[in-house]
Image (cartoon, rainbow, N blue to C red):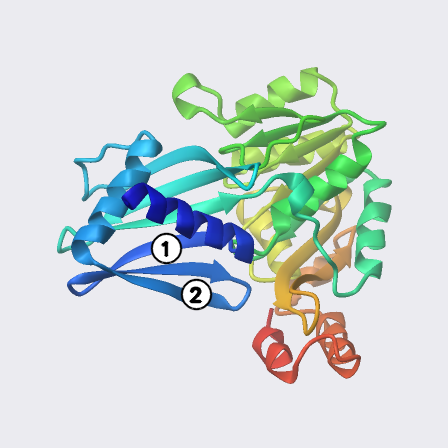
Amino acid sequence: MIEALGQQLLKGAVTAGSSDLYILPRGNAYVVYEHGIEGLILIQSLPQETGVQLIAHFKYRADMAITENRRPQLGAMTVQIDGTDINLRLSSVGNFLQQESLVVRLLFPLGQQQTHFLVPGQWETLQEWCGLRGLILFAGPTGSGKTTTIFQLARSLSEKQSVLTIEDPVEITEASFLQLQVNNEADMSYDALIKVALRHRPDVLVIGEIRDRQTAQAAVDAALSGHLVFSTVHALNVYGIITRLRQLGIPEAAIHQAVTGVAYQRLLPAVDAGSTALLDLKRGPVSPEWELKTGMTPEWRQHLDDCERAGQITATTVDRFKEG
């Protein structure tokens, strides 16, 4: 029964194209949500006993400690839904009442993650940047499709260029890439793997995320040495991406020389096309004036207004995403 319920919930989430499945305690019961383009969607309420059993079932399959329901745990597993392998990343933790919650991230194969762009010319702009080499940085909330866009760009280059990725962990598998996974316990940090990666002389280097000064400096150095480098950072807008590099101690001259372009991405609900990506783009080189700017660019709001007039998105969507 529990196994069938788990499979049913996963299949429903895959069919809906949801990014996450939540199993959360609510009083003396549990609730199941999917996270989609419109936010959290309530799927089902469960008796407390069923919710506990369901979490234990997923944890068992992901090789997590079933008897530990307080401390945070991470796990991974692969399931087959309608003949397709879907990678799952699991995260569990207990609240102050020792009620456990579980979030399951669904990672679809790259071939099933074709991003549709609200402004078609933005994809062509990204492709033009790829021809310039250097560092291309993306920002946006979790689930905004940044990694998918980066991988689509990299895959479009992989027929004639070698692509190497460094991730923590590997989320999307792609046979045409050489993919390395961070393992700090084995002294395989981002910084260490980037140094190893460059000895393989890749044309394109994908770094899953820039989190610290060492990784940022390694990414900049790789870009300055003539590689095309993609990565992501935490920032609220395109200007914040550069601010983040400065906060990590990257010299202004290096930022100016290395950064080809920055992109802030969101997934928006389209009237007749499901989810669609909108990007706020700024082409390098970075000027000192960027430090004085905040928020979204004028082009971002213009794209929203133009798409509303064209009937692609609603006025509610414009209002919701006008600040990014």
Pick whichever of labels 1 and 2 is earlier in the sequence: 1
Given residues 273 and 276, the one toward you in this image is 273
Question: Would you say residue 252 is visible in this rendering?
Answer: no
Image position, residue 298 (x, y; %): 74, 74
The amino acid type of the residue labelled 1 equals Tyr
**Contact? badges 1 and 2 (CB < 8 Å):** yes
Image position, residue 301 (x, y; %): 71, 76
Residue lying at 13% horizontally and 55% vertically, measured from the top left: 97
Q: Which residue in the protein does label 1 denote?
A: 22
Mark 2, Cα crowd under 10 Å, few <14 / some 14-19 / many 20+, is: some
Image position, residue 226 (x, y; %): 80, 30
Residue lying at 42% horizontally and 25% vertically, measured from the top left: 184
Q: Which residue in the protein does label 2 denote?
A: 40
* Numbered label attached to residue 75: none
Given residues 11 and 311, the one toward you in this image is 11
Say which element carries label 2: strand
From the viewer's perspective, tell me whether residue 48 is left or right of residue 275: left
Image position, residue 285 (x, y; %): 79, 50
Mark 1, Cα crowd under 10 Å, few <14 / some 14-19 / many 20+, is: many
The amino acid type of the residue labelled 2 equals Leu
Q: CA distance from mark 1 to mark 2?
A: 9 Å
The image quarter in which residue 308 lies: bottom right
Q: Note whether 220 is above or below 104 in the view shown.
A: above
The image quarter in which residue 270 lies: bottom right
Given residues 131 and 61, the one toward you in this image is 61
Question: Would you say residue 306 is visible in this rendering?
Answer: yes
